[in-house]
Image (spheres, helix red, strand yellow):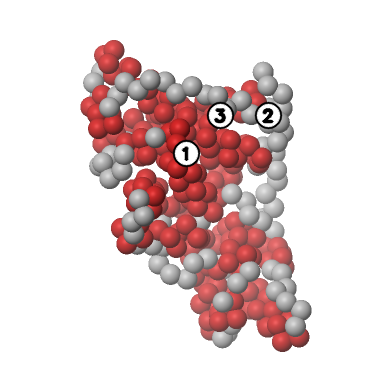
Amino acid sequence: MNDVLSRLLGPDEPEVTCEVCFDELDRYVELQLRGLDAEAAVPGMAAHLRGCPACSEEHASLTALLADGSTS
Amino acid sequence: MSPAGTCDVIPGMSVPARIVQPDEWVPALRAGGAAGERAVAELHAVLLRAARFEALRRRSTLPWVGAAELDDLVLQAADDALVAVLSRLDSFRGASRFTTWAYKFAIYSTAVTLRRRAWRDREVSLAPELWQLVPDRGRQPQQQVEDGELRDALRRAIEALTPHQRTVLVAVALEQVPIDVLAERLGTTRGALYKTLHDGRRKLRAQLADSGLLEVTR
């Protein structure tokens, strides 16, 4: 599916809300960085990150920040 | 002051010596007195570091914003994040490191601030005609026929949405207006707008499924 259709139709599966995404983001990213099954811990998070550009950007930023050695 | 187009906010920044131990943030921040003030100052430094990191990632979206203004925006975002963190200390359950939990407030605050700054002088057109931006996906005759059917079905589905759903879907999905920018202009929240977007998307998918075209989109 092209990008426009993807943005129009969004993820075709259950997803968390923006509020739950924010509440769980720190735990989710730490689990991902430890190589654990973050999606099992927060079902619907991955779908939301595909559907919400703003939450997706913040997920990417937190991941990058934690991966940056100077912040540990 | 640095010249416009450069960024002072990350390189060479100093990391203050840590006073608060990783598992002692919450009691330290609640301590009050001089010790509590030191903990709050250290937390602010942590949040400012995250805010600067986020600003550097977004620098290219704000080429016309000078370094001094960007520094001010970043400091304001860190201040806002500090208020948010302190007001929500009770909600910290230890599911992650405290600093990770705090970082997300700084990233959120900075991202929202800089998205709004990037769009401050831009008009947000909410014209529903923009659905015509749905592009062709291929040059093969069969695909062109499918694209035409798909575009017609999408137009009908978008027209069947409520006016508010149509406004949000067109702005966010087609015009790619950041949802925080749209929320500010419509006087609502990201969460409320995303719910509207989600409901609109579900209607579109249902209509395409009724038309037998949902599989075409995959």
Q: In the drawing, what numbered circle is on residue A68?
A: 1
Q: Amino acid at mark 1?
A: Asp
Tell me whether marks 3 and 2 sit on the same chain. Answer: yes
Mark identifier at residue B10: 3
Residue at figure coordinates x 64%, y 23% from the top left: B68
Mark 2 or mark 1: which is in front?
1
Instruction: Name the residue nearer the viewer: B201 or A35.
Output: A35
Can residue B75 be seen?
yes
Question: Does dot 2 land on a helix, a strand or a loop?
Answer: loop
Residue at 69 percent across and 52 percent down: it is: B125
Q: CA distance from mark 2 to mark 1?
A: 21 Å
Question: In what quadrant of the picture does the N terminus of chain B appear?
Answer: top right
**Disc 1 element:** loop
The verdict on a common chain for dots 3 and 1 is: no
At label 3, the amino acid type is: Ile
Q: Is residue B23 left or right of residue B106?
A: left
Chain for numbered disc 1: A
Q: Position of residue A64 (x, y in %)?
A: 48, 44
| Outermost residue, top side | B34
Q: Amino acid at mark 2?
A: Thr
Identity of the residue drawn at 36% across and 55% down: A35
What is the number of the mark on residue B6? 2
Image: B88 above or below B40: below
